[in-house]
Image (spheres, helix red, strand yellow):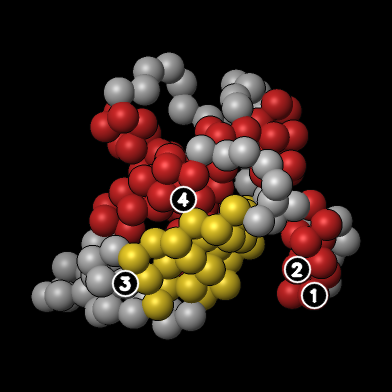
Amino acid sequence: MAIDVNNESGTDIDERAVLDIARYALARMRIHPLSELSVIVVDADAMEQLHIQWMDLPGPTDVMSFPMDELRPLTKDDEEPPQGLLGDIVLCPEVAKKQGEEAPTGHSMDEELQLLTVHGVLHLLGYDHEEADERAEMFGLQAAIVDGWRAEQGVTGPSPAPTVR
């Protein structure tokens, strides 16, 4: 998979972990290996501008997803996944740091960015959390992906609880 991580935020983040968990999530969701994804990391001011422009909501947010080719995970009837451009995920480490600190389990900014990366991938694949059943499905899948990746990395301890609202 072609995954670009572009850190424009001025904050040091674990770019390798963001790249690795994005790759893991896409493979777990059976997305074509030649598909493309872009992850952009921005500061709070840039994220606020995007949040206002696209959602008409004030203040910076943690993650935004901008789908391109509307790729979807394979179903049991699909033989081969389609190839294409997934789109862009935009992350804000300043918001991630605050959310990680405020989470019930308390976790690092980088752990929150990993969680948000998976969250963004799921949004690109058409998952949402507006309704209770959608929320349960998306957050359950998000937790399974994060837990699976952490297990592969040899990370022990509790996984970050979902902080995305």
Density class for disc 1 (Cα within 10 Å; few <14, some 14-19, many ≥20) is: few
**Mark-to-mark CA distance, 1 and 2:** 5 Å
First of labels 1, 3 by sequence position? 3
Residue found 63% across the figure and 46% down from its top? 164
| Label 3 vs label 4, nearer the camera | 3
In the image, is residue 75 above or below residue 91? below
Circle 2: element type: helix
Residue found 33% across the figure and 53% down from its top? 23
Density class for disc 4 (Cα within 10 Å; few <14, some 14-19, many ≥20) is: many
**Mark-to-mark CA distance, 3 and 4:** 16 Å
Q: Which residue is mark 1?
A: 53
- Total count of labels: 4
Q: Which residue is mark 3?
A: 35
**Mark-to-mark CA distance, 4 and 2:** 20 Å
Furthest residue toward right: 58
> Camera-side residue: 123 or 152?
152
**Mark-to-mark CA distance, 1 and 3:** 27 Å
Density class for disc 2 (Cα within 10 Å; few <14, some 14-19, many ≥20) is: some
Q: Which residue is mark 4?
A: 118
Quarter holding residue 143: top left
Circle 1: element type: helix
Circle 4: element type: helix
**Mark-to-mark CA distance, 4 and 1:** 23 Å
Q: Is residue 102 left or right of residue 156?
A: right
Q: Which residue is mark 2?
A: 50
Density class for disc 3 (Cα within 10 Å; few <14, some 14-19, many ≥20) is: some
Q: Are marks 1 and 2 in contact (CB under 8 Å)?
A: yes
The amino acid type found where label 3 is placed reads Ser
> Camera-side residue: 133 or 98?
98
Residue 144, horizontal then vertical, whole percent: 36, 40
